[in-house]
Each structure stands twice: as structure tokens, then as C-alpha cells.
Image: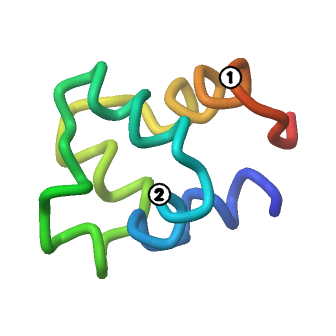
Amino acid sequence: MDREALLRTPVRVLLSAHPSLMRLLEEHGVHCGECFIADRETLAQVAIMHQLNPDALLDEWAQRESLPD
């Protein structure tokens, strides 16, 4: 999945496939695993809602697992 597609994907979908994303979000104080919003909000929306830069978040996530540059 390319970066734009990742940003448009509901967070719950990403969390179920990528446990490292949950750890990363929790380190930033975002606890999507406990929130009903994760079912419908995209990764970009969640990042912005929590004052995180979506592209920087993807970069940090890419460092933890193999994601597109």
C-alpha cells in the first residue's frame, strides 16, 4: 500500500494488520485501540486530530517496519 493509501485507510484496519502502529500511536499519546472513532477515521484524520504531522508519522512508522518511502 502506498503512503497516500495508508493515510486514507481507517485506523482500525491498519492497527489489526500492524501492531507496531499501535505502539507508535500510544507513544504519542494516541490510544486508538480503545476508541470507537478508529473504526471510521483515517490515519490522516487521527493524526491531525491529535496534532501530529501525518507525513512525519508515516516516516516514523516506516522506520519501524517496511513501508513505502
Looking at the picture, how far across and down is residue 66, in whole percent? 84, 35
Is 58 located above or below residue 17 in the figure? Answer: above
> In the rendered image, which quarter is residue 51 located in?
top left
Name the residue: 40% across, 31% down. Answer: 23
Q: CA distance from mark 1 to mark 2?
A: 14 Å
Name which residue type carries label 2.
Leu
Question: Left or right: where does residue 41 sit relative to residue 12?
Answer: left
Pointer 2: what residue? 15
Is 31 located above or below residue 59 in the figure? Answer: below
User: What crowding class fits label 1: few (fewer than 14 Cα within 10 Å), some (14-19), or many (20 or more)?
Assistant: few
SS class, disc 1? helix
Task: Please state which of residues 5 and 23 is positioned toward the viewer in this rendering.
Answer: 23
Name the residue: 86% across, 34% down. Answer: 69
Pointer 1: what residue? 64
Is 17 located above or below residue 22 in the figure? Answer: below
Residue farthest bottom in this picture: 40
Name the residue: 59% across, 50% down. Answer: 18
> In the rendered image, which quarter is residue 40 located in?
bottom left
Looking at the picture, how far across and down is residue 4, in whole percent? 69, 59
Quarter of the image where the N terminus is located: bottom right
Looking at the picture, how far across and down is residue 43, in whole percent? 43, 56
Name which residue type carries label 1.
Arg
SS class, disc 2? helix
Question: Left or right: where does residue 45 sit relative to residue 69?
Answer: left
